[in-house]
Image (tube, rainbow, N blue to C red):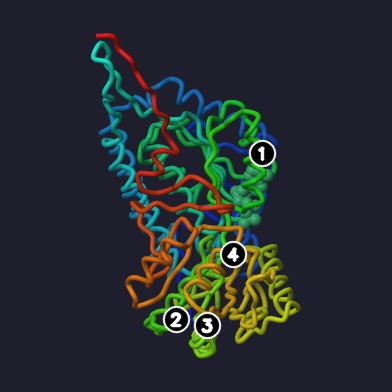
Amino acid sequence: MGVAVSLEPSVKSFVGTPARKMLIDGKWVAAASGKTFDTLNPATGEVLAHVAEGDQEDIDRAVKAARRAFDDGKWAAMRPAERQRLLLAIADLIERHGKELAQLETLDNGKSLNESQNVDIPAAAETFRYYAGWVTKNYGETIPSDPAFFNFTLREPVGVCGQIIPWNFPLLMAAWKLGPALACGNTVVLKPAEQTPLTALRLGELLQEAGIPDGVVNIVPGFGPTAGGALVHHPQVDKIAFTGSTEVGKEIHRETSSTLKRVSLELGGKSPNIVFSDADVEAAVQGAIMGVFFNQGEVCCAGTRLFVEQKLHDQFADTLAKHAASLKVGDGLDPETRVGPLVSQEQYERVTGYLEIGKKEGAKALTGGARAKGLERGYFVAPTVFTGVKNSMRIAQEEIFGPVVSVLPFKDENDAVFQGNNTLYGLAAGVWTRDVSKAHRVARALRAGTVWVNCYNVFDPAAPFGGYKQSGYGRELGRYALDLYTQVKSVWMRI
Ligand code: ADP
């Protein structure tokens, strides 16, 4: 094992004791109940930090603070150039504290420093910077109407937004949520995932340093059914933005019907990554690796169903397995690590449970299929390549959320599209071919919110992202996210 990096002093002081507090109305406070919970380091299973455990009463205080900060009108009516300056300051602060935030993310989530440093943290900064640009460009329209009247539209903020985020990209998901919400003049109660609350809490300090007014962003860590549930049910919340499992997404959809809160949902996936025999095979292998082992496979758009044209199938699966076996698995703080531990014991059990299900269903693990060797503690699963999989098997239909790929053969273009679309989900898909016409046809035929051609897992804050079918609704990123965080007012004037 390589030598782990030494931790920044600011990281050392952020973890351990005392317990981290929650941010309500510009103040760092303990939970009303006084309770705390532990967040663990997935590489060791040891306690990393203690965190205030938010519940109904804390959510109520946070929502009331966000309500006041919205209803007094100062934030929404702030000069756009001034709000833009604040969002740009957040981006700068994230970059300035990049090393520290990356280490904190790796300690809390397990992901490799290589990824947290080069992907999560820079992308979070870029997201705030991108939405800073929109603050001054969020125009309404003038509408042609009877000349006796003047009709125009205003794009107004929705109000108080409850944002519930997952543990796979903790800081980046906070940025995807906060960036557009703040740009449009909303106020927020953010609930980070209970497995990974630390970078969101550190971000709260940076938001204060940037000058975000008290109450505009409140950050309440806690568990899903308690803190998350209280946010979903709170009558003074205007909108819920959720990223997480399809199961919880459906519950939120049901539970918000009584108050008709606006809802946007970014949920699970079982994305097809389709390799035609005319593809650049080496690039496709690298793309398949990136598609499924990036972030330990804990990625909602992971290319977990790898369809390979029949005549290329066996050779492709073997090459992929060799590459997968050579990926260095280990503590994320080791700079050589490519695949870190899964986030939690629960996730470890879920993923290894699916490995057993796969074997029982008759799939064969060309590599992996079990705990990573030589790592006695922590939640490490070996990168796994299954063959002998049918698209109807559970491992091909249910989201595993770990470093596990199923390689499946297909006959021709129609078969690839049919099998690719044969899933409840529709978050993303990949296509590998040198035939431009085929690439166009297949990209259009796949029912997914994102299609990558001859690439995978490429993102930009300007490009929309979201799901078809049971992968959710609403589009994050790009100008589309502005629709989630604004409502249109039509104003009539007699002239
Ligand atoms: P996973 O199964 O991958 O942990 P979840 O969908 O359970 O994903 O969690 C994603 C986020 O949703 C987390 O912040 C979690 O606390 C929250 N959450 C879980 N259950 C609920 C719930 N019933 N109501 C509101 N939020 C929830």
Q: Residue at x 65, y 46 (%)?
A: 250
* Residue for badge 4: 422
Q: Amino acid at mark 4?
A: Asn
Q: Amino acid at mark 1?
A: Arg
* Residue for badge 2: 285
Q: Residues within 10 Å of mark 4 (few under 14, many from 20)?
A: some
- Say whether mark 3 is within 8 Å of ligand 1: no
Q: How many numbered marks are there?
A: 4
SS for tag 4? loop
* Residue for badge 3: 324
Q: Is residue 483 visible?
A: yes
SS for tag 2? helix
* Residue for badge 1: 254
Sooner in the amino-acid sequence: mark 1 or mark 2: 1
What's the CA distance linking mark 4 and mark 2?
Answer: 23 Å
In the rendered image, residue 113, in percent from the top left (x then y), is placed at: 45, 68
Q: Residue at x 53, y 73 (%)?
A: 415
